[in-house]
Image: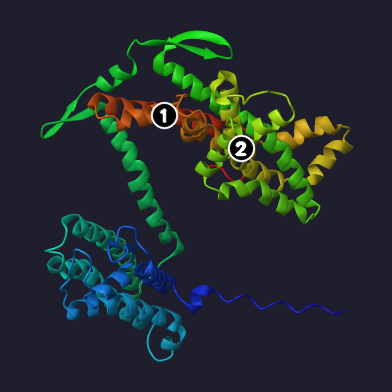
């Protein structure tokens, strides 16, 4: 009996290049790309004006090109070493990383890391000192606005590169000391990112909801709460019924209405679609992946562009009005956005279209993993199709449904761009309200925006907590939970 010989095991990438050298290689490659990447902050007014990378800017300065209204008197001995650093050193570091197995034949494992560490330290000091020193004297007689633009661009570039090289220096130091970097340690930058860009902003919102700047310090005040919960009532119409509600409570109800309908609409469309696609995928239909790609494709298009396309479709000169007039169903264009319930329906339709992939993917990822034998066992035990679906398939797919609700409900409730663009500013939602508060020059209004953001945060946490508990009760392990 002929047996197919077993394939040799794939060589571990870490045996070719350890983790610390992978990090050094990635930081060197990113810094090299960054040097050639055009930055909109580095706008140098040659004739005509253009956007330059740091490399092109310094080569121009090295040649001492006179510009309209500006003249650089930069000494070439200063720019040339910097150009060598931003070009030659990253290439040399990449070469050291790639040739790591060859270096080990003659030297110890620490040698490549020591070489990389020396170059990294030199680059750190160069990026920290050289760009500003080179331009300080050259821009002295230039237009202040122009000089500030170039300095800001170089500051942005230098800071990003410094962060890269700091990471690379730490990795090279680990290798030079003979320490090992485990894959778990690669999660530390993520936690730092989470701390700086998620937790700290939330703490800042909480702080600014209760404190305002007063002189050299801060004072406790509840003016934001007073502004938000002032006894100002408005007449709001919901489904043809006029309600006399507190102003911002009516805005909250409208946003909640949009979020609920968006979630229900996405679930109503996404579940049957995910069920069909998962069934075809289990039968090895090659078209299932193409169909899934077709429905996920809108995620690759900018949301603002899609929203303006919908707005153009329903505009007085849009496609829908042209079709209605061509069929003689109306004699003049219909102002859909001026009719209250139609405008609400269009906003909900566009929201469903925008968030549909976020419901489709979690549900599909759970349904495609379900074992069909469980469904067939229910049928063999006497259950009809409807009973087998309601008692077997639907409960097992609850983790995907809950995950989809988490990914659709809260973003839809706080999303302000679609209602604002579709209604041309006539529909006010929670997102619009927070934006208007924060951008207001009044301290009380800004504090009210932070208070409203804090209330929304509490609402989000409560909602997600309820959904988490429901997911645990359903025994969910399904896939794309937040």
Q: Residues within 10 Å of mark 2 (few under 14, many from 20)?
A: some
Pointers 1 and 2 in contact (CB under 8 A)?
A: no
Q: Is residue 215 left or right of residue 57?
A: left
* Residue 22 image-quadrant placement: bottom left
Q: Which mark is residue 353?
A: 2
Q: Which mark is residue 81?
A: none
* Residue 389 image-quadrant placement: top right
Q: Is residue 344 above or below residue 314?
A: above
Q: Is residue 174 above or below residue 420?
A: below
Q: Is residue 242 left or right of residue 396?
A: left
- Which of 91 and 435 lies nearest the eye of the viewer? 435
Q: Position of residue 461 (x, y in %)?
A: 45, 31
Check disc 1 and report the residue beneath it.
432
Q: Position of residue 200 (x, y in %)?
A: 31, 42
Q: CA distance from mark 1 to mark 2?
A: 20 Å
Q: Residue at x 60, y 22 (%)?
A: 342
Q: Position of residue 79 (x, y in %)?
A: 22, 76
Q: Residue at x 51, y 24 (%)?
A: 256
Q: Is residue 65 visible?
A: yes
């Amino acid at each position: 009996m002929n047996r197919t010989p077993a394939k040799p095991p794939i060589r571990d990438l870490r045996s070719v290049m350890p983790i610390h050298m992978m990090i050094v290689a990635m930081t060197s490659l990113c810094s090299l790309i960054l040097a050639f990447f055009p930055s909109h902050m580095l706008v140098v007014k040659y004739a005509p004006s253009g956007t330059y990378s740091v490399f092109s800017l310094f080569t121009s300065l090295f040649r001492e090109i006179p510009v309209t209204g500006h003249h650089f008197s930069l000494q070439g001995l200063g720019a040339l070493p910097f150009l060598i650093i931003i070009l030659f050193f990253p290439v040399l570091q990449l070469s050291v990383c790639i040739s790591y197995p060859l270096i080990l034949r003659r030297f110890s494992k620490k040698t490549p890391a020591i070489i990389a560490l020396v170059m990294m330290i030199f680059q750190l000091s160069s990026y920290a000192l050289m760009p500003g020193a080179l331009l300080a004297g050259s821009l002295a007689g230039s237009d202040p606005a122009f000089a500030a633009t170039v300095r800001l661009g170089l500051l942005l570039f230098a800071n990003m590169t410094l962060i890269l090289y700091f990471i690379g220096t730490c990795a090279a130091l680990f290798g030079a000391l003979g320490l090992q970097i485990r894959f778990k340690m690669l999660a530390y930058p993520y936690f730092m990112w989470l701390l700086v860009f998620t937790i700290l902003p939330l703490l800042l919102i909480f702080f600014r909801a209760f404190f305002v700047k007063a002189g050299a310090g801060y004072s406790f005040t509840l003016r934001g709460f007073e502004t938000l919960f002032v006894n100002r009532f408005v007449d709001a119409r919901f489904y043809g019924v006029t309600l006399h509600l507190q102003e911002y409570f009516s805005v909250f109800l409208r946003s909640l209405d949009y979020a609920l309908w968006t979630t229900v609409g996405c679930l109503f469309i996404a579940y049957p679609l995910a069920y069909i696609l998962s069934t075809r995928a289990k039968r090895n239909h090659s078209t299932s992946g193409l169909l899934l790609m077709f429905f996920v494709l809108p995620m690759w298009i900018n949301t603002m562009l899609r929203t303006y396309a919908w707005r153009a479709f329903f505009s007085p000169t849009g496609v829908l009005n042209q079709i209605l007039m061509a069929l003689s169903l109306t004699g003049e264009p219909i102002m859909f956005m001026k009719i209250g319930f139609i405008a609400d329906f269009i906003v909900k339709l566009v929201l469903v279209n925008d968030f549909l992939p976020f419901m489709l993917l979690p549900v599909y990822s759970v349904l495609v993993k379900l074992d069909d034998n469980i469904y067939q066992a229910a049928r063999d035990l006497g259950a009809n199709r409807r009973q087998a679906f309601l008692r077997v398939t639907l409960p097992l797919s609850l983790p995907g449904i809950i995950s989809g609700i988490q990914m659709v409900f809260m973003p839809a409730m706080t999303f302000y761009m679609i209602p604002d663009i579709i209604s041309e500013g006539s529909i006010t939602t929670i997102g619009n309200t927070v934006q208007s508060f924060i951008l207001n020059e009044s301290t009380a209004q800004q504090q009210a925006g932070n208070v409203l953001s804090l209330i929304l945060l509490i609402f989000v946490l409560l909602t997600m907590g309820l959904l988490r508990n429901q997911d645990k009760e359903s025994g969910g392990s399904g896939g794309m939970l937040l």
